[in-house]
Image: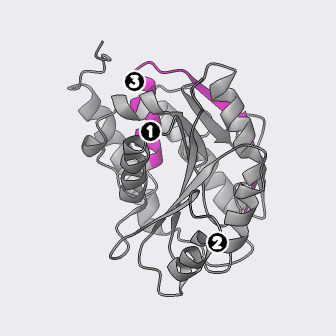
Amino acid sequence: MKIEKNIVIIPTYKEKENIERMIRKVFSLTLPIHVLIIDDNSPDGTADIIKSLQKEYPEKLHLIERSGKLGLGTAYITGFKWAMENSYDYIFEMDADFSHNPDDLSRLHDACDNQGADLAIGSRYISGVNVVNWPIGRILMSYYASSYVRLVTGMSIRDTTAGFKCYKRRVLETINLDKIKLKGYAFQIEMKFTTWKFGFKIIEVPIIFTERQEGTSKMSGGIFNEAVWGVIKMKIRSFFKNYKIAQ
């Protein structure tokens, strides 16, 4: 009998306040899961904390160190390729700062394993607006950003910018990751759009998103500019692409 392999990819930059607690929490779950940290040369010693924990979790905790801040998208693509090379079946994305509740990893896994999803999204907006400790302006910006993406792309996904997800490996094997253009937070939109265009089944799982308590947010105005113009360019590029899955 084949033993299923699960891994959660967590990009980090200056997350020393959160990373040990997050790693220990993930490994305390009943869901058997490994952790891959992609650290972008955090100057606060984040990678050193992870290396010390690898002695405690030598087979389950993995670390890739990069030379600097190279973008969220490239961090995840690096992680996806590593996960596929190492034959993981379910590949998760999650933030390090507890804005995503690790307990919800099991619910995302269930959506893929038992409900037929190829991509399960931890959705802030599938059952109302489930966001804690955000100012109203940021909530509105995020909510209407998803509305904008739905309008441009034709997708029905409620939370198009969500970064808490579970992929079946075959989705990532199908997508040409080297052709993903958007590298910041809009990377999340392009990955969902590409998954949708290939006809994979997507399920949104309602979650409660809680703003970080420790560390510093990495959001900036440039992130939203990339999303606004990047989505239009992405849609135009899609007219010239073939989304048939090779048999």
Q: Where is residue 76 in the image (x, y as percent from the top left)?
A: 43, 53
Pick whichever, 85 or 126, lies toward us.
85
Q: Where is residue 36 in the image (x, y as percent from the top left)?
A: 52, 58
Question: What coloring was used for the rendering?
Answer: one colour
Is 123 displayed left or right of 150 in the figure? right
> Does any portion of residue 19 appear in the rendered image?
yes
Residue 47 magenta: no
The N terminus, quarter of image: top right
* Stretch of the chain drawn in magenta: 188-212
Is 216 displayed left or right of 225 in the figure? right
Kind of residue sitting beneath label 3: Lys
Q: Name the residue under label 3.
A: 197
Which callout, 2 or 3, points to the residue nearer the camera?
Answer: 2
Q: What element carries label 2?
A: helix
Lower position in the chain sequence, tag 2 or tag 3: 2
Asked whether the beta carbons under mark 1 and mark 2 sit within 8 Å of each other, the answer is no
Find the distance from the CA under tag 1 to the CA under tag 2. 25 Å
The residue shown at (34%, 50%) is: 182
Q: Position of residue 122 (x, y in %)?
A: 66, 41
Q: Is mark 3 on a helix, strand or loop?
A: helix
Lower position in the chain sequence, tag 1 or tag 2: 2
Residue with the most extreme left position: 240
Q: Position of residue 184 (x, y in %)?
A: 40, 58
Quadrant in which residue 129 is drawn: top right
How many C-alpha atoms fall within 10 Å of the one at disc 1: few (<14), some, or many (≥20)?
A: few
Q: Mark 2 points at which residue?
A: 19
Q: Mark 1 points at which residue?
A: 87
How many C-alpha atoms fall within 10 Å of the one at disc 3: few (<14), some, or many (≥20)?
A: some
Kind of residue sitting beneath label 1: Ser
Lower position in the chain sequence, tag 3 or tag 1: 1
Kind of residue sitting beneath label 2: Ile
